[in-house]
Image (tube, grey):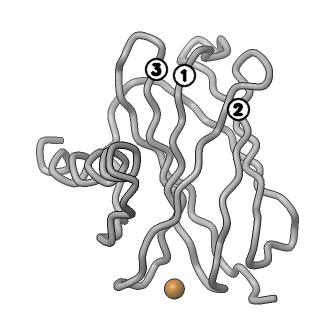
Amino acid sequence: MRLASPLGIVCRFAILALTSAGVLALAGCHQATRQPDGLVIESEILPQPLQTGAVILNLKARDAASRPVTGARIELEGDMSHPGMAPVFGRATEDAEGHYSGRLDLPMGGDWVILMHVTLADGQKIERQIDVKGVRAK
Ligand SMILES: [Cu+2]
């Protein structure tokens, strides 16, 4: 959908700003572009029940033929479901074939959306998101 692509550009800009200038982009990014690319990412978030502080994401990426997707780069962006709050960033790295894990620090209790900005080994960019509701304040 062409309509969704400007939001994808905003997301990539946020990552660019973080990596090239060391500056956190303040604009939240609550939508992900979706493409009929066949990528499936199964996610597990620990610890349960979720609390503020460090959370670990375990991700299993496979393609339309259920083969593990290796060599991808997965940038993580956590946004709260309400406006006006800076996102948090992290990265998931591959620790086994098609398995990626990463960490995010969630500073506030409530409902979060975690965006996964995926760059496949061939350079194709894909966005996925996970809704994470009811994070408890410690
Ligand atoms: Cu908040």
Residue 66's x, y, as percent? 65, 16
Tell me the quadrant of the picture where the N terminus can be found: top left
Residue drawn at (65%, 11%), measured in percent from left and top? 67
Q: Which residue position holds label 1?
A: 72
Callout 2 environment at 10 Å: few (<14), some (14 to 19), or many (20+)? many
Amino acid under disc 1: Ala
As measured in the structure, the alpha-carbon distance from the residue carrying label 2 to the one carrying label 1 is: 9 Å
Q: Which residue position holds label 3?
A: 120
Q: Which residue position holds label 2?
A: 100
Residue 43's x, y, as percent? 70, 45
Observer-nearest of 46 and 16: 16
Residue 64's x, y, as percent? 53, 17
**51 on left or right of 129:** right
As measured in the structure, the alpha-carbon distance from the residue carrying label 2 to the one carrying label 3 is: 13 Å
Q: Considering the numbered disc 1 on the image, is that residue within a helix, a strand or a loop?
A: loop
**Number of callouts in the render?**
3
Q: Considering the numbered disc 3 on the image, is that residue within a helix, a strand or a loop?
A: loop
Amino acid under disc 3: Leu
Residue 102's x, y, as percent? 70, 45
Q: Considering the numbered disc 2 on the image, is that residue within a helix, a strand or a loop?
A: strand
Residue drawn at (33%, 43%), measured in percent from left and top? 20
Tell me the quadrant of the picture where the C terminus can be found: bottom right
Q: Are marks 1 and 3 in contact (CB under 8 Å)?
A: yes
Amino acid under disc 2: Tyr
Tell me which numbered mark, 2 or 1, is placed earlier along the sequence. Answer: 1
Q: Quadrant of residue 45?
A: bottom right
Observer-nearest of 124 and 15: 15
